[in-house]
Image (cartoon, helix red, strand yellow):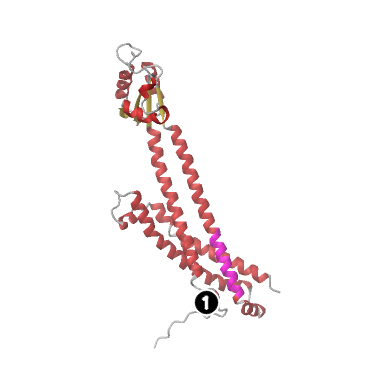
Amino acid sequence: MAERHRPPADFLGLRAALADRLLPLLVGAMAFLAALGIAGAQASAGLAAHWQQDAATALTIQVPTPQAQDATTTTTRLAAVLGALAATPGAEGVQQLSPAAINNLLSPWLGTDTADLGLPLPAVITAHWAGPGGVGPLRAALQKLSPGTLVDTGALWTGRVAALTASLQACAAAVLVIVALIGAAVVSVATHAGLAQRRETIVIVHELGAFDGDIAGLIAQRILRLTVTGALTGTALSLPVLAWLARLAAPFAASTLSSALLGLPAPLWAALPALPLIAALIGWGTAQLTVRGWLRTLP
């Protein structure tokens, strides 16, 4: 008859002193929050990259006194600018805003009807730049045809979006650091509580000649198992939440939770398995430092 496998002897009574309920629950909550923080950082980076691409290629052209004659006196300034844009290879999606659209844009500052102002408003044209290099040659050509024409790019907005992305990623990094510090504090408190419960036993074993490293190793192994269990549970529970958030963010790209889960970005899939490993490292290291420091205080 095969001998049944027996768990290693618990000489210090750590299973009773370090229960397998509260610590895994708290570590699991920390891992859950860390997973959401990483996902938020990934989402903000992807969205910002999309915004930056759109803003960098956006063109806004303002043509003052659009119905006046252009520099060649053969057509209107507006017609000359539209013709030049149509002949420029890099200008795509050229569209003139209607007076109603311009009125809607200016109404928050100038009132409900800009026609009541009695001032000539410039014609506004929107486009996207897909040509090589910058828009300097295009700006010079339009100025030559229609002096006073303004060509604005999304460079200012691109810089602002980049700054916003950097701040969001810094906030996500700060959240992860705070979560790690809280996790280390939770492990330290749990270890101190276990040491207090088994103080007499540990003191006796220590006085009999047990090395500090051996005692710290036994306690750290127990903490390691508890933290890994909690981190795995918290990471697993974050997956359906992340899939649900992905489905809300892209309702037409993923029709089910499973497809939304598979559609999560690859960097996020690479980061999630690291959470239990990081939790294990924090738990083991914190337990080692806590126990060794406590043992040094013994007479």
Give the camera-side residue of 86 and 183.
183
Residue at 48 percent across and 46 percent down: it is 168
Q: Quadrant of residue 240?
A: bottom left
Residue at 63 percent across and 72 percent down: it is 212
Specify start and end residues of the magenta stretch as a single range: 181-196
Q: Quadrant of residue 17?
A: bottom right
Q: Give residue 64's position: percent from left, percent from top.
A: 38, 19
Farthest right residue in view: 299
Q: Up-down: is 3 above or below 95? A: below
Query: In the picture provided, is 43 more to the left or to the right than 80?
Result: right
- Which quadrant of the figure contains the C terminus? bottom right
Q: Quadrant of residue 133?
A: top left
Give the camera-side residue of 283 and 101.
101
- In the rendered image, which residue does mark 1 sit on? 15
Q: Give residue 260's position: percent from left, percent from top.
A: 33, 54
Using a 10 Å C-alpha cutoff, classify the residue at mark 1 as few (fewer than 14 neighbours), some (14 to 19) or many (20 or more): few
Most common SS among magenta residues: helix
**Numbered marks: total:** 1
At label 1, which amino acid type do we have?
Arg
Q: Give residue 196's position: percent from left, percent from top.
A: 61, 74
Residue at 42 percent across and 84 percent down: it is 4
Q: Up-down: is 124 above or below 221? A: above
Please tell me whether mark 1 sits on a helix, a strand or a loop. helix
